[in-house]
């Protein structure tokens, strides 16, 4: 490691962190519409009520936007640009089901590796709690899914190709499809029971669909669907970017051999 | 019913199993993780309207991760 580079990174990190803390200490939030919400109790979580109940269609659209974004990522970083079949022939790589066979690359220092595994496990736990508490606490599917994807990213950054937490391509595909399909199917159930698409029903055949102190109806399930979808989308993006590193390395190696 | 209050914990456990199954290495130090999880769960606190002293959802999700990891035969 270059000591000057380390020093520059440490200094920039300290200055950046000190700036953030300094400005967070001085922050003043204008009460605004908050006063009305605090005095008049309507629902436990206004944001979720708006996102998943009043504007369920909007959230469905957001999910589909993510799907399109991931599909385009696949097109850009996937097979179409980097056809690695010639590389496989060159290096006599074994044929596997997965698109890219990850070799050993990009491991970080021992200290970071020791910290990142427990951190990734606790981040997954926190992500799950954030997803499940979306109807009554700040958070929800998007944030929780992003937290779990963050644990995947942390694991990849620290361990490289030997990442202990590894979502392979077929799993991500299934998760993405499952998340989007669950959202659409729950919407159809609302249509059957209440007459409107994404109608929030609280009981089915006399049973609470989400038992608990607050009758949240379908909202927690929508949160779970969105959480799985966001987790799959962000993980797919990092999967592609990490694999791209391998492909570029291989292309460079093949160039050297061909020379 | 008090069982109703544990419904999110059961879901947390199931999602934990789903993610824990994807860990490629065998996760050790089970009791260490559980003790730290208990401390984190205590600081997180239960969801609003839930009469618990700590976040059982967090605890169950970590348990689920370990169970999912155990279910994987490769480890």
Image: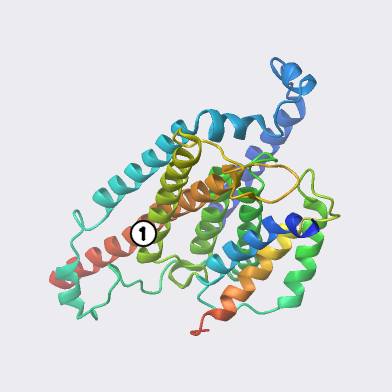
Viewer-nearest residue: A248 or A128: A128
The image shows residue A173, relative to residue A117, as above or below, that is: above
Query: How many residues crowd mark 1 within 10 Å: few (<14), some (14–19), many (20+)?
Result: some
Viewer-nearest residue: B66 or A82: B66
Q: Which quadrant of the figure has residue A87? A: bottom left
Viewer-nearest residue: B38 or A51: A51
Q: Which residue is mark 1?
A: A173
Check the picture and name the quadrant holding the C terminus of chain A: bottom left
Say which residue appears at 68% left-offset and 70% top-offset: B63
The chain letter for the residue carrying disc 1 is A
The image shows residue A196, relative to residue A204, as above or below, that is: above
Residue A183: horizontal and vertical position, in percent?
45, 46
Viewer-nearest residue: A8 or A135: A135
Residue A214: horizontal and vertical position, in percent?
72, 42
Residue A1 visible, this orientation: no
Residue B6: horizontal and vertical position, in percent?
73, 59
């Amino acid at each position: 490691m270059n000591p000057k580079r380390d020093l520059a990174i440490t200094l920039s990190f300290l200055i950046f962190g000190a700036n953030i803390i300094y400005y967070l200490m001085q922050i003043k939030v204008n009460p605004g519409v908050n006063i009305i919400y605090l005095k008049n109790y309507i629902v436990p979580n206004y944001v979720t009520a708006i996102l998943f109940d009043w504007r369920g269609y909007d959230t469905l659209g957001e999910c589909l936007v993510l799907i399109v974004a991931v599909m385009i990522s696949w097109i850009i970083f996937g097979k179409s640009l980097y056809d690695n079949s010639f590389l496989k022939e060159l290096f006599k790589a074994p044929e596997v089901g997965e698109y890219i066979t990850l070799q050993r690359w990009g491991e970080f220092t021992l200290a970071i590796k020791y910290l990142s595994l427990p951190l990734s496990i606790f981040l997954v736990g926190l992500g799950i709690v954030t997803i499940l508490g979306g109807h009554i606490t700040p958070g929800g599917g998007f944030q929780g899914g992003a937290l779990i994807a963050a644990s995947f990213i942390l694991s990849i950054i620290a361990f490289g190709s030997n990442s202990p937490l590894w979502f392979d391509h077929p799993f991500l595909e299934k998760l993405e499809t499952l998340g989007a399909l669950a959202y659409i199917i729950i919407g159809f159930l609302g249509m059957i029971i209440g007459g409107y698409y994404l109608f929030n029903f609280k009981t089915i055949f006399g049973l609470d669909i989400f038992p608990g102190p607050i009758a949240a109806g379908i909202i927690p399930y929508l949160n779970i669907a969105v959480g799985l979808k966001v987790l799959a989308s962000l993980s797919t993006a990092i999967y592609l970017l990490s694999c791209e590193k391998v492909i570029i390395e291989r292309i460079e190696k093949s160039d050297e051999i061909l020379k | 019913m008090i069982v109703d209050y544990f419904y999110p914990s059961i879901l947390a456990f199931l999602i934990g199993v789903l993610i824990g199954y994807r860990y490629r290495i065998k996760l050790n130090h089970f009791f260490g993780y559980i003790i730290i999880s208990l401390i984190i769960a205590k600081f997180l606190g239960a969801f609003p309207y839930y009469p618990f002293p700590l976040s059982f959802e967090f605890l169950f999700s970590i348990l689920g991760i370990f169970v999912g990891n155990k279910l994987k035969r490769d480890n």
